[in-house]
């Protein structure tokens, strides 16, 4: 990472943590909190201002730098403002899913107008007239994938952070310092949010959540980052790398939506069949869920990165990704069996922990 990028990342960490902390009393005063209910297991009302804090800092610091001269970054700021605003209304009023999809598609169109869209599928296929519908579909898909994986303290932020780290590395290697600094700033802002969202000694539960506004913003950020890196001359393969660095949310989202549709249910009908729910029921703590998911993401993204860096063909990566989607669909088809297998593996990895207790049930759904 360049010195400018490092400065942006560090500034993003401290600024976002500070802004999110300052927003906590404001969120309580305006009832912008996630309250415990039958589906949510956290024990106290928790402010959902993580996304608002990230957007404030990315916008402020980004426009103070070279972002004001970047058409793509300005489109990101405007579309991010739209999603954060709609997300806050959703957190307060629980908007219909069709209305949320409409605004997500509108945000994708704003990105497109700023030049941030998919021009090809790696180096395999030029999209041509299909660039617009493909980009809207991909953006909306990633937004919902990140939203659905936002079910355990620190999980979605960590997975998005891993993806942004890969995109930042791509921009640095491509010799694109402005984009690298913008991505490093976004990575720093996500890390700053995680300071208040992860569980660690001294912080037994998250102090803030992303909320629907934050998960939508982070999904948009991933889509924007992938589009911007892929349009750097000679780096179209970033379009093949992108699904691998955010593989867990994408695979989880596709499989669950497909299963709900096959069962005759709405694809947006919430349940407790996400991968983090299975891990939790198998005895994994929120901290171990994050560690496990981060290791998988780093491994998947790193392997795909090495494959592409070696100049090997892209098509096998596409086929393998689709195969993983199918395998996860089959593996998770019987929930009890999947949880039992994960529980056995958890006991083998942590033989001294024993059975999970009811105290450990406090986690963000």
Image (cartoon, rainbow, N blue to C red):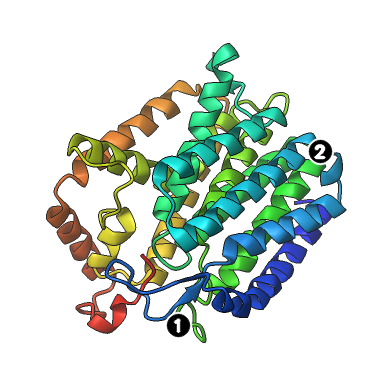
* In the foreground, 94 or 252: 94
Residue 127 occupies which quadrant of the picture? top right
Report which residue position mark 1 lands on.
Answer: 204
Judge from the rendering whether residue 242 lies leftward or rightward of residue 168; answer left or right: left
- In which quadrant will I find the C terminus? bottom left
Q: In the rendering, which numbered label is found on residue 70?
A: 2
Mark 2 crowdedness (10 Å alpha carbons): few <14, some 14-19, many ≥20: some
Residue name at image x 71 percent, y 60 percent: 56
The answer to whether residue 42 is above or below residue 55 is below
Work out whether 87 lies above or below 285.
above
Q: CA distance from mark 1 to mark 2?
A: 41 Å
Residue found 70% across the figure and 44% down from its top:
78
Q: In the figure, residue 129 lies in which quadrant? A: top right
Q: Nearer the viewer, residue 162 or 137?
A: 137
From the top left corner, tell me how far across and down residue 185 is, in percent.
73, 55
Outermost residue toward the bottom in this view: 202
Element type at marker 2? loop
Label 1 environment density (alpha carbons within 10 Å; few <14, some 14–19, many ≥20):
few
């Amino acid at each position: 990472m360049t010195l400018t990028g490092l400065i942006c990342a560090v500034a993003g960490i401290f600024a976002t943590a500070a802004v999110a902390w300052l927003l906590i009393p404001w969120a309580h005063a305006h009832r912008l909190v996630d309250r415990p209910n039958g589906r949510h297991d956290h024990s106290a009302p928790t402010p959902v201002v993580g996304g608002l804090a990230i957007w404030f800092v990315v916008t402020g610091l980004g426009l103070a730098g070279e972002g004001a001269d970047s058409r793509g970054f300005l489109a990101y700021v405007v579309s991010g403002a739209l999603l954060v605003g709609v997300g806050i209304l959703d957190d307060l009023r629980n908007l219909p899913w069709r209305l949320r999809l409409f605004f997500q598609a509108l945000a994708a169109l704003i990105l497109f107008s700023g030049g941030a869209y998919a021009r090809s599928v790696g180096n395999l296929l030029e999209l041509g007239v299909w660039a617009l519908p493909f980009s809207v579909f991909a953006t909306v898909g990633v937004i919902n994938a990140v939203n659905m994986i936002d079910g355990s303290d620190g999980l979605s932020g960590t997975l998005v952070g891993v993806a942004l780290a890969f995109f930042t590395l791509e921009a640095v290697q491509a010799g694109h310092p402005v984009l690298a600094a913008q991505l490093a700033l976004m990575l720093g802002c996500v890390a700053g949010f995680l300071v208040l969202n992860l569980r660690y000694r001294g912080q037994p539960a998250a102090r803030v959540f992303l909320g629907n506004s934050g998960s939508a913003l982070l999904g948009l950020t991933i889509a924007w980052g992938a589009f911007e890196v892929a349009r750097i001359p000679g780096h179209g393969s970033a379009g093949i790398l992108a699904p691998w660095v955010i593989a867990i949310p994408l695979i989880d989202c596709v499989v669950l939506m497909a299963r709900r549709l096959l069962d005759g249910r709405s694809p947006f009908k919430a349940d407790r069949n996400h991968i983090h729910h299975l891990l939790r029921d198998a005895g994994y703590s929120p901290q171990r869920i994050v560690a496990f998911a981060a290791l998988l993401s780093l491994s998947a993204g790193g392997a795909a990165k090495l494959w592409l860096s070696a100049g090997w063909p892209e098509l096998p990566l596409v086929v393998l990704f689709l195969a993983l989607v199918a395998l996860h669909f089959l593996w998770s088809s019987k929930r009890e069996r999947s949880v039992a297998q994960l529980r056995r593996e958890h006991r083998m990895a942590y033989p001294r922990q024993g059975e999970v207790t009811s105290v450990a049930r406090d986690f963000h759904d």
